[in-house]
Image (spheres, rainbow, N blue to C red):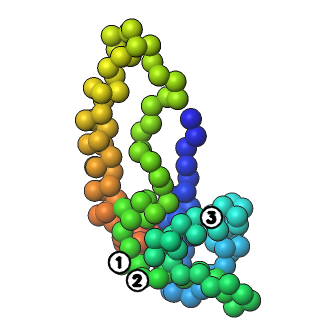
Amino acid sequence: MTRSCRFFVAVHALALLAHAGGGAMTSDVIAASVNTNPVVVRRVLARLARAGLVATQKGPKGGVRLRRSAGQIELGEVYAAVESGPLFVPPPRRPNASCPVGSGLASALDPALHDAEAAVQSALAQTTVAALVRRLRRL
């Protein structure tokens, strides 16, 4: 089972852009802050750009900048922009259908997992990138 860190990279990049005051920043600079390969950052930035959260410009004076103010970007929309699929996924192999637990576990678990995903989205929607940057500045 693989886990994604795209959300953390995306939030890091957006917070860094907001913290810097709105000027363009290269993926190399962002990658140095995240401590990852610039290719990872560029892939995440591409998703953020498709979602309308950042604008990118190529060339020697290029870079990425926030497309909207940090106060208008909620973490829930960041998550939706960079992550795909459900938060919880079953194992790739189906359980034994003749087992009384295995045969119905997915259906029995579904309401709780749906509620958990809704709670995560709701919680993320309560925080903007600007609020996150304010918290960082207090640390």
Q: Earlier in the sequence, mark 3 or mark 2?
A: 3
Residue 22, placed above or below residue 138: below
Find out whether the residues at labels 1 and 3 contact each other: C-beta distance under 8 Å.
no
Indicate which disc residue 43 carries.
3
- Residue in view at x 25 percent, y 35 percent: 111
Name the amino acid, label 3. Answer: Arg
Residue under pointer 2: 69
Name the amino acid, label 1. Answer: Gln
Residue 94, placed above or below residue 29: above
Pair 3/2: label in front: 3
Pair 1/3: label in front: 3
Name the side, left or right, on which 101 lies relative to 47: left
Query: Considering the numbered disc 1 on the image, is that residue within a helix, a strand or a loop?
Result: helix
Query: Considering the numbered disc 3 on the image, is that residue within a helix, a strand or a loop?
Result: helix
Crowdedness near tag 3: few (<14), some (14–19) or many (≥20) residues, C-alpha within 10 Å:
some
Crowdedness near tag 2: few (<14), some (14–19) or many (≥20) residues, C-alpha within 10 Å:
some
